[in-house]
Each structure stands twice: as structure tokens, then as C-alpha cells.
Image: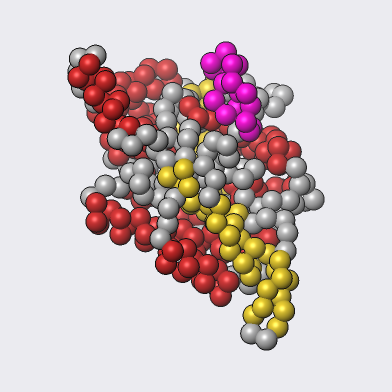
Amino acid sequence: HTEFGQQILSNFLFNVCKLEKNWSMDNLVETMTAEFREKVGEDRVILALSGGVDSSVVAALGARAIGKQMTCVFVNHGLLRKGEPEQVEEVFTKQFDVDFIHVHAEDRYAELLAGVTEPEQKRRIIGTQFWKEFFAVAQQLETDGKPVKYLAQGTIYPDIIESGARKTGGKASTIKSHHNLIPFPDGVSFDLIEPLDHFFKDEVRELGLALGLPAHIVYRQPFPGPGLAIRIIGAVNKEKLEIQQNADAIVREELDAYNERLFEETGERNSEHSCWQYFAVLPDIKSVGVMGDERTYQRPIILRAVESSDAMTADWAKLPYEVLGKISSRIVAEVPGANRVCYDITPKPPSTIEWE
């Protein structure tokens, strides 16, 4: 976050220490493909596919390494962003030479989460059910004569650090649980493949481009495994989910357009000076408002937008007032149940990017 910080680091590494810039992502792709193929051999793999950047990159890597030996399992917990399940299915049935299974678990998750307000309990419920859904698919594959030995995941390094540094000796405090770091339930015996577990988000994106993924996947908004359950504060229900999804769609549409304008002006995409991650949060409160001549008592929307490159640290995005104004106007005009918009201007640390 220091002014000219990247240049300072570059000067130190290459001018003072005399290191050479001899590393390339293309070389890494070849190495990772060979390692993936060698580890799997003739066995089968299930991929925990969320449709986000991390799991999509693992899918592309697995498709390159072992093709249809890998089954991509997309668990739809009903907590995805507006229109996302349809987009995920379209992308991963048309652009990847792998088996794809869409698990519709929306009703099961709704029942399990009914009335649950504590965020870590939400994460545990979603994570535990996540594994159960996978185990059911694996059992079916076994019945079909396709036993599965490995489970591939899009775990990245910040996931490990924030979950208590499972792979680094447990020397970091647990900030929040991640669905893909919760232990297997009884009876599950997969070996894990986590090829991105020492990558930061910006490196994952670069790897995705090197693997030939289209830009609209590579630069997709980061999305938590528990989905909108941790962007809806308090208990999740159908009404709150609909408000959040509709508000979030407006936030993403407007800030996608803002980032595109920045790209046209600067020639840089996803720089630290553009808006890196952005979404709507629905708090568990209501506020008084006026629409027309009538009093309203509806929910506020919290806008969260940050600048970052690796998700380990982040600063709030210095959005132009006209952009903030348009987002606010659209949300209160177009989203039934919302009558106020607030902007979160807290950096990470002390806050996290997500609210729960």
C-alpha cells in the first residue's frame, strides 16, 4: 500500500539483489499439468466446481491433464448470485471436455439453514452438506463402475491462512472457516488434489489466462463457498435472498461497466486502482424511508467494494460519487424491499472483505 510500492520491491529484487526475471507462467502450466497427470495416473477425480475463478482454473488444468477422467460436480445450494447457476452449467458443458454433474440441493440447504443466524454455524452447515452432496455423487459413480480416488479443489493460499494455516503448522489464528477446509464426514476416503494451495488470487487469474480460459471467467468476481448465506446477515429466507440477489446484480452491472471504462482509459485490467471485488450485503435490520407520499419500513443495502490484488489485504474503492449515486438510485427504485444504500469504507485489516 506504499506509494510506488511495486517499484520499490522490483528495484530491491532485480537491481539490489540482482535476481533474474526467468520465471514464466507458461512453464508453470506445463509443470502443473505433468504433475496433475502423474499423480492421478489412471484413477478418477471429482472436482468441487463452484463456477468461481479458483475452481474454474482447476477445472481447466484437470481437463488439460486428464480430460474425462475428471467429473466436475456443481453443487447448487440455492445461494448463488442471480443467473449464476445457468451460467455455470453453460460454461462447463460447452467449454470443457469433462463430465459435468449439476446437483440441485437448493431445498435441502434451505431446510438446514432455516432460522440459523450465527455465521460460523452457517459455514459449518454448508460445508458439511457440501461434502455429503459430493459423497452421494461419488457413491453413484462407484455404482456405475467409475470409482473415484481423488477430490480436486480450488483452495488458494489465503483460504489456508484465514482458516488457521492448516498446511503451515497452525501458526495463524482462524479468521473464518472455509467450506473446502472442513474435514471429511465419516465414510469419505478421497485423496485431495489442491494445485492452487500456494497461489494468491492474482496468480490464479494469470494461470487461468495461460490455460486459455476466457477473460469473463478469469476476471469473474470472487465468491465465497457459502455463497450469499454470509452476505445475508441473520437467518436466510426466500424474501431476503431475493432482495440481496436483485441488489447485488445492480452493483455488479454498474461496477463491471465502471471497471470496463477504467480499462479503456488505462489499458490495465484488474489493477490495484480499479475496483477488485464488489457486492451487496443485506443486514438484518430495517430502516424508515419515504417513497411517494408513503412511509416505508424496509431493508438497507450495504455496498462493499475494495481494491486489492491478492485478497490478503484490501482498501475500500474510491468510487466516483456519480457511480455511487447511480447504484443507490437504481437499488431503491428497482429492488422491492430495499429503501436505503450505505457504503462500507473500511480496509482489510481491520475488517475482512466479506461481512461474515
Query: Do we see residue 111 in this rendering?
Result: no
Q: Which stretch appears magenta?
A: 160-177
- Which is more toward the observer, 353 or 81? 353
| Residue 12 image position (x, y, % from top left) | 26, 20
- Which is more toward the observer, 114 or 71? 114
The type of colouring in the image is: secondary structure
**Residue at coordinates 35% horizontally, 55% vertically from top-left?**
259
- Which is more toward the observer, 167 or 73? 167
In the displayed structure, does residue 297 sit left or right of residue 243? right
- Which is more toward the observer, 199 or 152? 199
| Residue 157 image position (x, y, % from top left) | 48, 27
In the displayed structure, does residue 31 sit left or right of residue 254? left
Q: Is residue 351 magenta?
A: no
| Residue 299 image position (x, y, % from top left) | 68, 64
Q: For the C terminus, give its image quadrant.
A: top right
**Vertical comparison of 141 with 20: above or below:** below
Query: Do we see residue 199 in this rendering?
Result: yes
| Residue 176 image position (x, y, % from top left) | 63, 33
Q: Main secondary structure of the magenta part?
A: loop
